[in-house]
Image: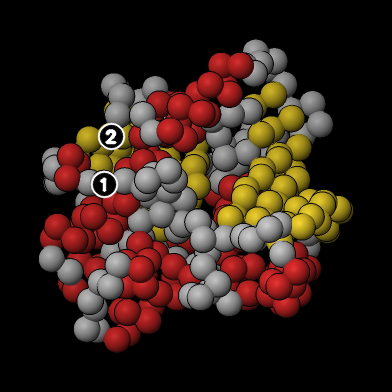
Amino acid sequence: MSLEDKIIKKLNSSFFNSNKNLVGIGDDCAYLNKEDLLISTDTFIENTHFDLDKSNPKQVAKKFFNANYSDLQCSGGQPAYCFLNISFSKKKSEFIHHFIKELTSLLKKYKITLMGGDTTKSITDISLTMTLIGKPFQKKIFLRANAKEQELICTFSNIGFSKLGYDILYKSKTIRDLKLKKQSIKQFLSPKIYSYAALLTKLKVSSCMDLSDGLIIDLIKYSKVSKKRFHLNNLDNLNPTLYKKLNISDYYNYVLTSGEEFVPIFTIPLNKLSSAVDFFKKNLRVSIVNIGSVLNGSGVTTDEYDLNQIHSFDHFK
């Protein structure tokens, strides 16, 4: 168990609430049933989530917004209000001015009202925290616990570019294909923003989770909450470009551990797969990939690759 998981487990045990009107720790958002409100919050720390030598203010703002927006969408909602906390040193004020300009532009674009927050002085690194409040498109929100046996596990195609971009920038990963190199760096620094919550609602998906820490580690969390086994297959089709360009070991490493993708992992009945594929292709120009099935049991399994060779993301390593 990672240090992050230990801290969350301790907090959960200390503040466990059996109130049926509340959904708290364990999903992408908190849900206040009585008020019909979804609430999510996320923090970005300089030199942990972004690096001023590699990222410009516009890229940081877009990624920061995306991390928060995706969380609320994966619970089936649309954000309406925002609270923003910023800590920074005076010498980084110019960066913050440009960051705020881009962030407010995104908030206006997605019709989110900034209601307040806090601004404080930091000695060195920038700290950014956003809280989004919104309403679900329907009364029944998407909970990880609602995954059902025999349902299909689906997500967007082309997962893996984000981690490859990180490795190119920070681990001197050599990629001779200039187009692939540029695409991967762009996805890492400024991942594309998708608006998909309304589409998931229309499809009546059973459960959903935001892909932010990597497919394997996120599915392990999904499995724990739903008390089901997530069996993976069809992984060769998850990212056709990387499958062609990389050796097989690298391919599985990237598609299974790439974080900060900010796309949904969701479960649907078998008879809805075809309509889901067509629906997302038509409305969002995104390819949906079925990557496995929900089965009785626990954990994440696959017959396609040895998962013991996978080193998943950990905030504290």
Given the image, on which type of amino acid does mark 1 rest? His
- Mark 2: few/some/many CA within 10 Å (<14, 14-19, 20+): many
Which is in the foreground here, disc 2 or disc 1?
1
Toward the right, the furthest residue is: 115
Toward the bottom, the furthest residue is: 178
Q: Is residue 197 above or below residue 176?
A: above
Residue 201 visible at all:
no
> Mark number for residue 311?
1
Q: Residue at x 35, y 62 (%)?
A: 163
> Mark number for residue 173?
none
Q: Position of residue 142 (x, y in %)?
A: 57, 37
Does 209 sit left or right of 154 as displayed?
Answer: right
Q: Residue at x 44, y 45 (%)?
A: 315
Q: Position of residue 98 (x, y in %)?
A: 72, 77
Q: Residue at x 22, y 35 (%)?
A: 301
Does 284 sit left or right of 117 as displayed?
Answer: left
Residue 247 visible at all:
yes
Real-space Cα separation, disc 2 to disc 1, in angstroms: 14 Å
Given the image, on which type of amino acid does mark 2 rest? Val
Secondary structure of the residue carrying tag 1 is loop
Residue nearest the observer in this picture, 314 or 20: 314
Q: Which residue is mark 2?
A: 300
Q: Position of residue 269 (x, y in %)?
A: 40, 38
Q: Is residue 172 above or below residue 13?
A: below
Q: Is residue 79 above or below residue 25?
A: below
- Mark 1: few/some/many CA within 10 Å (<14, 14-19, 20+): few
Q: Position of residue 33 (x, y in %)?
A: 74, 28
